[in-house]
Image (cartoon, helix red, strand yellow):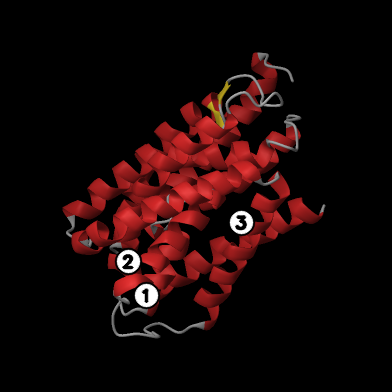
Amino acid sequence: MTYDLVSLAPLALALMFAGLCGGILAGLLGVGGGIVIVPVLFHLFSLIGIDPAVKMHLAVGTSLASIIPTSISSIRSHLKRGAVDKELLRSWAPSIAVGVLAGTVLAGLVRGPVLTGVFAVIALLVATHMTVTREGMRIAEQLPTGLLKHVIAALIGCFSAMMGIGGGTLTVPTLALCNFPIRRAVATAAAIGLIIAIPGTIGFIVSGLGVASRPPLSIGYVSVMGFLLIAPVSMLAAPVGARIAHTIDPELLRKAFALFLALTSARMFYGLLG
């Protein structure tokens, strides 16, 4: 791989653009930005010759790391508007953390194509759900209680960690189906993203230590260059998305969420099958 300034300039611009899109989406949709950052990093790492055995792990780990400052910025914006459900956050946090731990361990054990397949399939399922269900449709009047509540939270944490996303991709439709207002679901998902990103990042750093095929300028499965270029831009852009989320029509918000998920899934399937 080459690291001269001329060859790095287009890559740096692409990473910053991914951070911009990811930050806006983090505030707008509560998705932590990973739904954009992971596929962008996956294809960029392919272009610069990263070993196929580790490029998806590296994309997921770097995405989780960049979500940390983005989520903090997004949470602050939503908290100012009183949109975060703090009671739900306290209730779900332990189970989500357990799920993240399990997902991180699994991600360290499986091959890259497995992570790519998980990302593509879940993104497509959620996009389909958001497209075919009408506004206000629900399967329950409130969230489940007891063991089922903890299972749902753990699964969200597990799959989010394996996908390198902040949890909004799964949290928003889950809450919406349980009679949560979409804006409140988005705001709470942004906070859940931080619970996922911190232990997830630590896990990917640890599991990637000592892996011989890792590229330079990386700590475990986290690209330092990717983090330094994506995170600041995402953090600055997240409040913009949060402001937009409180001004646009909820139905438009649902359609935007579904569109981004569908496009992301298609790109990942293309990378997997190609």
**Helix, strand or loop at disc 1?**
helix
Mark 2 vs 3, N-terminal side? 3
Which residue is located at x 51 percent, y 31 percent?
Answer: 205
Q: Which residue is painted at 32% across and 77% down in the image?
A: 144
Q: Which residue is mark 1?
A: 176
> What residue is pinned by disc 3?
119
Which labelled disc corresponds to residue 218? none
Determine whether the residue tagged by mark 2 lies in a helix, strand or loop: helix
228 relative to 263 in the view: left or right: left
Classify mark 3: residues with Cα within 10 Å, few (<14), some (14-19) or many (20+). Answer: many
Going by the numbered disc 2, the residue's amino acid type is Ala
CB contact under 8 Å: marks 3 and 1:
no
* Residue contact between numbered discs 2 and 3, judged by CB atoms under 8 Å: no
* Mark 2 vs mark 3, CA separation in Å: 21 Å
Relative depth, front residue between 238 and 92: 92
Which residue is label 2 attached to?
185
Q: Position of residue 57 (x, y in %)?
A: 62, 40
Amino acid type shown at disc 1: Ala
**In whole angstroms, how far apart are the C-alphas of marks 2 and 1?**
7 Å
Against 203, is 229 above or below? Answer: above
Circle 2/circle 1 CB separation < 8 Å: yes
